[in-house]
Amino acid sequence: MKKLLLSIPLLLLFSCASAPKAPFDLLLGYDYSIVDNEFNTIKGDFYNVNYSLEMQLNLGAGFSTRSKAFGQGIYVDIRTLAVHNFNATDYRITAISENFGALPLKENSNKFPTVTFFIPTNFQTAEEAKAAVKGDVITLTVNDRVYRFVAPI
């Protein structure tokens, strides 16, 4: 099984209600680790990957202090076309960070549709956040498909 690390960091900004502002501004998009040629392209802030013959997923993961909806933390975001009616209740989805543990489901919306996993953090400096994220790998599982993201530092 050939693996290729795509080293283009992604930016992902959440919208919605406000959350407490972090004492520093930092966004680290995790790199997508390609396995089995499921990667298609980059679409905006997401890696577009094959899920099945009928459906593609847009995936993003990382650390952000810029999330207006959730505040500072580690996130995984999944989006697809509205025609697929992708919903977290219809799939077995988990997101687990090696450094931070399981990310709980925070959003399951029909907008796009979007499924967001998020675990809050409380770092006081960018250096502290970078040290905690260093070497992190997030494993996203959607039913029997596994997608991995690697911290860029």
Image (tube, rainbow, N blue to C red):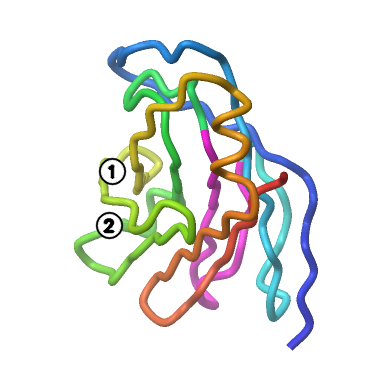
Residue at 26% x, 49% y is 105
Task: Determine whether the residue tagged by mark 1 lies in a helix, strand or loop.
Answer: loop
Amino acid type at mark 2: Asn
Q: Residues within 10 Å of mark 2 (few under 14, many from 20)?
A: some
What kind of secondary structure does the magenta stretch mostly adopt? strand
Specify the segment rendered in magenta. 46-63
* Above or below, comparing residue 141 to residue 59 in the picture: below
The image quadrant of residue 150 is bottom right
Decide whether residue 55 is among the magenta residues: yes
Residue at 36% x, 77% y is 143
The residue that mark 1 highlights is 110
Q: Position of residue 107 (x, y in %)?
A: 27, 41
Badge 1 vs badge 2, beta-carbon distance below 8 Å:
yes
Residue at 57% x, 59% y is 137
The residue that mark 2 highlights is 87
> Toward the viewer: 80 or 105?
105
Q: Quadrant of the N terminus?
A: bottom right
> Toward the viewer: 9 or 130?
130
